[in-house]
Amino acid sequence: METMILDKTAQDFVDQVEELSHSNLRRCLHCLTCSGGCPLADDMDVLPNGIIRMIQFGMKEQALSCSTIWLCVGCNTCSMECPNAVDMAAIMDALRQIAILENAKIAEPGVLSFHNAVVDSISRYGRTHKLEIMMRYKFAEKDLFSDIDLGLKMLSKRKLDLLPSKVKDKKSIQSLFEMAGDPS
Amino acid sequence: MNKIENLSYFPGCSLATTAKENNASLKLFLNHFGMELNEIDDWNCCGSSSTHSINSKLALSLAARNLFLAPPNRQLLIACPGCFLRLSHAKMELNGSKEKQTQYETHFDRSYNKNLELIHFFELLAKMSEKGLFENLTGRLNGLKIAPYYGCMLARPPRMNKEKNHYGLIEKTMSTLGGESVRWPFLSSCCGTFLSVSKPMIAEKLVNRIMKGAIQSGAECIVTACAMCHLNLEIRCRPENRLPIFHFSEVLSLALEGGASKDWFKRHLINPAPLLEQRQLIPCQKIKNNGFFR
């Protein structure tokens, strides 16, 4: 078995995640409650508690490039069920943000592309415009034809509005984006 | 009811667009009990799941703008569980940091009201029920068998675990109104939310597990309080697992005499009309503005 040398780098990464997530990784008992209750665990390459172990072992590149952090939808089931109050969902947020900031390999680019389409819509209208989000996402992913029947059905049921619901004070929304700056 | 007659209201993007029937039925139901909802002027998106996934500061800023826009003297009613969590989270962050409060006060050029009361639709219902407002509506749902579906709305991060939790409220309200709730294992199982777009196969798996569970439990329909769940269950459900899905507010309105509009149900992708007919829950043909206010 490969020997791992745990050096200062591991603590740096732990500190970075703890600061962003306001969560204490040492509280994790690896009882697997988070992983057992996670609705997405089946499709993840690393179980949620395994991610904590990876952070503690300084396996930064591996932790940031796993599919787990992008398949997590932040449903908070893990965070609520954790017997030791580890905020796993917040840890996942932190890892996604570090991955973007440090140009890590994104295991699920489609999911990030969707998040970007949503945030982009908010920056333009102050609200989410679902039809445009879908269209932008489909173009970005060069996937125009899957779900086309569904899209048409939703349009016919007037589930998808053609025009966005907008905030009047556009400048105030812009100023929030300027204030927030890059993800951190 | 003096304290909750006049409420500020944050509908959120889903209720303003894809789930207009959720918005209309909620307003109609509350108006029936003399409650006036005052939409916050020029509200913006709460940030949704995507913003906090990629930029925490922006997530706080977007939610904070709504908190600063809300009139200080009224409770702020939020119907969407997602928006409620985002806005409550922002309130917690601001209340916990004088520095952040000052930063946003300077930015918005307004003072921050740390006592702004955020109230979820569930909490309002619980209060209405305590006051006995639903006593005249007993038995109205003619034994409609429902699977109560909370999705992830009952879950929250550890820092907020002292907040109120309304587990069991759908069941309790339904039984007062003459509906029957089944016991089933998927009542708080996540619908997959945005993965429905970028990972439809995963969402389909989660949704069909939930739908199948509801059918096996003997339910005739699913009742949810989340517009996102409603949409996902409808669009990712395979034909063999189809079961009508109702917004909680629609079922509440069905219990009022002439209180529900046919037009709400026409917007459903899984047609609930045959079930409503079977249970003799007949929505109205004509309702003021079709029940769609604005």
Image: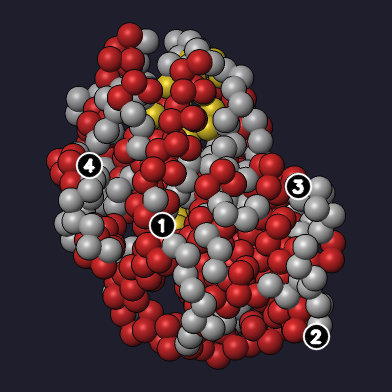
Cβ atoms under marks 1 and 3 closer than 8 Å: no
Tag 4 residue: A150
Tell me the subunit letter for badge 1. B
Residue position marked by numbered label 3 in the rendering:
A32
Element class at badge 3? loop
* Labels 2 and 3 touching (C-beta < 8 A): no
Which of the 4 image quarters holds residue B277? top left
State which mark lies toward you, 2 or 3.
2
Q: Which residue lies at the image location 80% right of the left edge and 85% below the top edge?
A: A8
Q: Nearer the viewer, residue B234 or A175?
A: B234
Q: Are marks 1 and 3 on the same chain?
A: no
Q: Residue A41 location, x and y as percent?
A: 59, 46
State the image coordinates of residue A117 (x, y, percent, origin top left).
33, 68
| Cβ atoms at labels 2 and 4 below 8 Å apart | no
Residue that appears at 54% across and 28% down: B148
Residue B183 rendering spot, x and y as whole percentages: 61, 19
Q: Is residue B110 above or below residue B168?
A: below
Q: Is residue B107 left or right of residue A81?
A: left
The answer to whether residue B71 of the structure is visible from this angle is no
Protein chain holding label 2: A
Residue drawn at 45 percent across, 27 percent down: B211
Give the residue number, with chain letter if any, for mark 1: B12
Q: Position of residue A29 (x, y in %)?
A: 84, 54
Residue type, numbered disc 4: Leu
